[in-house]
Image (cartoon, grey):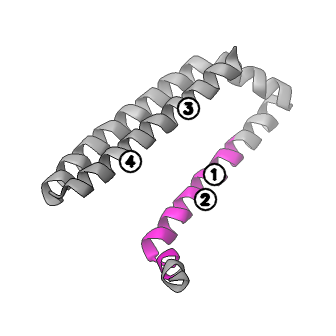
Amino acid sequence: MALDRFRRLLNPRVGLALLWALLVALTAVAINLAGIRLIGNIDGWSCWMRGHAAYFLIWRLCLYTATVYGWWWMRRRLRQRETSPESHRRLLRTEIAAVLAIVLLEGSVLLRQA
Protein backbone atom coordinates (compact mmCIF):
# COMPACT_ATOMS: atom_id res chain seq x y z
CA MET A 1 0.00 0.00 0.00
CA ALA A 2 2.81 2.44 0.85
CA LEU A 3 4.51 1.53 -2.42
CA ASP A 4 1.34 2.46 -4.33
CA ARG A 5 1.28 5.87 -2.66
CA PHE A 6 4.92 6.40 -3.54
CA ARG A 7 4.25 5.45 -7.16
CA ARG A 8 1.42 7.96 -7.30
CA LEU A 9 3.84 10.62 -6.09
CA LEU A 10 6.14 9.75 -8.97
CA ASN A 11 3.30 10.24 -11.44
CA PRO A 12 4.37 12.77 -14.11
CA ARG A 13 1.20 14.81 -13.57
CA VAL A 14 1.94 15.16 -9.86
CA GLY A 15 5.53 16.07 -10.65
CA LEU A 16 4.38 18.73 -13.10
CA ALA A 17 1.94 20.16 -10.55
CA LEU A 18 4.68 20.28 -7.92
CA LEU A 19 7.02 21.94 -10.41
CA TRP A 20 4.41 24.60 -11.17
CA ALA A 21 3.81 25.21 -7.45
CA LEU A 22 7.54 25.57 -6.89
CA LEU A 23 7.81 27.96 -9.84
CA VAL A 24 4.97 30.11 -8.51
CA ALA A 25 6.53 30.21 -5.03
CA LEU A 26 9.96 31.12 -6.40
CA THR A 27 8.41 33.83 -8.57
CA ALA A 28 6.64 35.31 -5.53
CA VAL A 29 9.90 35.31 -3.56
CA ALA A 30 11.77 36.91 -6.48
CA ILE A 31 9.13 39.64 -6.85
CA ASN A 32 9.26 40.43 -3.14
CA LEU A 33 13.05 40.54 -3.13
CA ALA A 34 13.09 42.79 -6.20
CA GLY A 35 10.49 45.08 -4.61
CA ILE A 36 12.45 45.33 -1.38
CA ARG A 37 15.62 46.10 -3.33
CA LEU A 38 13.83 48.66 -5.52
CA ILE A 39 12.15 50.48 -2.62
CA GLY A 40 15.21 50.24 -0.41
CA ASN A 41 14.01 48.44 2.70
CA ILE A 42 11.36 46.08 4.03
CA ASP A 43 9.40 48.82 5.80
CA GLY A 44 9.11 50.84 2.59
CA TRP A 45 8.03 47.72 0.70
CA SER A 46 5.38 46.94 3.34
CA CYS A 47 4.12 50.53 3.17
CA TRP A 48 3.95 50.36 -0.64
CA MET A 49 2.03 47.09 -0.50
CA ARG A 50 -0.44 48.51 2.04
CA GLY A 51 -0.91 51.59 -0.15
CA HIS A 52 -1.73 49.43 -3.16
CA ALA A 53 -3.91 46.89 -1.35
CA ALA A 54 -7.01 47.86 -3.36
CA TYR A 55 -5.23 47.00 -6.61
CA PHE A 56 -4.19 43.64 -5.20
CA LEU A 57 -7.81 43.00 -4.18
CA ILE A 58 -8.99 43.76 -7.72
CA TRP A 59 -6.29 41.43 -9.06
CA ARG A 60 -7.39 38.62 -6.74
CA LEU A 61 -11.04 39.12 -7.68
CA CYS A 62 -10.10 38.83 -11.37
CA LEU A 63 -8.20 35.63 -10.62
CA TYR A 64 -11.12 34.22 -8.65
CA THR A 65 -13.49 35.09 -11.51
CA ALA A 66 -11.28 33.32 -14.06
CA THR A 67 -10.96 30.33 -11.74
CA VAL A 68 -14.72 30.10 -11.22
CA TYR A 69 -15.30 30.29 -14.97
CA GLY A 70 -12.77 27.48 -15.59
CA TRP A 71 -14.20 25.43 -12.74
CA TRP A 72 -17.74 25.84 -14.05
CA TRP A 73 -16.65 24.67 -17.51
CA MET A 74 -14.80 21.67 -16.05
CA ARG A 75 -17.65 20.86 -13.66
CA ARG A 76 -20.18 20.68 -16.49
CA ARG A 77 -17.96 18.30 -18.46
CA LEU A 78 -17.21 16.17 -15.40
CA ARG A 79 -20.89 15.82 -14.46
CA GLN A 80 -21.67 14.65 -17.99
CA ARG A 81 -18.88 12.08 -17.90
CA GLU A 82 -19.28 10.94 -14.27
CA THR A 83 -22.93 10.27 -13.50
CA SER A 84 -22.56 8.42 -10.19
CA PRO A 85 -23.91 10.07 -7.02
CA GLU A 86 -20.56 9.50 -5.29
CA SER A 87 -18.67 11.54 -7.88
CA HIS A 88 -21.21 14.36 -7.49
CA ARG A 89 -20.73 14.29 -3.70
CA ARG A 90 -16.94 14.37 -4.15
CA LEU A 91 -17.28 17.33 -6.48
CA LEU A 92 -19.51 19.14 -3.99
CA ARG A 93 -17.05 18.52 -1.15
CA THR A 94 -14.24 19.89 -3.31
CA GLU A 95 -16.26 22.98 -4.15
CA ILE A 96 -17.10 23.61 -0.50
CA ALA A 97 -13.46 23.19 0.50
CA ALA A 98 -12.30 25.59 -2.23
CA VAL A 99 -14.83 28.27 -1.26
CA LEU A 100 -13.96 27.85 2.42
CA ALA A 101 -10.24 28.19 1.67
CA ILE A 102 -10.81 31.40 -0.31
CA VAL A 103 -13.05 32.86 2.41
CA LEU A 104 -10.44 32.05 5.07
CA LEU A 105 -7.60 33.53 2.99
CA GLU A 106 -9.49 36.73 2.26
CA GLY A 107 -10.65 36.91 5.87
CA SER A 108 -7.07 36.70 7.08
CA VAL A 109 -6.13 39.54 4.70
CA LEU A 110 -8.98 41.67 6.07
CA LEU A 111 -8.01 40.91 9.67
CA ARG A 112 -4.40 41.93 9.00
CA GLN A 113 -5.55 45.27 7.60
CA ALA A 114 -7.68 46.07 10.65
Q: CA distance from mark 2 to mark 4?
A: 23 Å
Marks 3 and 4 sit apart, C-alpha to C-alpha, by 15 Å
Q: Residues within 10 Å of mark 3 (few under 14, many from 20)?
A: few
* Mark 2 or mark 3, whichever is nearer to me: 3
In contact (CB < 8 Å): disc 2 and disc 1: yes
Q: Which residues are magenta?
A: 7-31
**View extreme (top): residue:** 114
Pair 2/4: label in front: 4
User: Of helix, strand and loop, which mostly describes the magenta segment?
Assistant: helix
Q: Specify the amino acid type for callout 4.
A: Thr
- Residue 39 coordinates in the image, percent (x, y): 79, 29
Q: Secondary structure at mark 3?
A: helix
Element carrying mark 4: helix
User: Which numbered marker is on residue 22?
Assistant: 2
Residue 45 — which label? none
- Using residue 26 as the reference point, say whether residue 70 is left or right of it: left
Q: Residue furthest bottom?
A: 3
Asked if the residue at tag 4 contacts the one at tag 3, i.e. Cβ–Cβ closer than 8 Å, the answer is no
Splitting the image into 4 quarters, where does residue 40 fall?
Answer: top right
Separation (CA) of disc 1 from disc 3 = 20 Å
Q: Where is mark 3, residue-wise?
A: 104
Q: Horizontal placement of 29 versus 74: left or right?
A: right
Number of the label disc, if any, that sits on residue 94: 4
According to the picture, the residue beneath numbered tag 1 turns out to be 25
Neighbours of disc 2 within 10 Å: few (<14), some (14-19), many (20+)? few
Marked residue nearer the N-terminal end (2 or 3): 2
Q: Amino acid at mark 2?
A: Leu
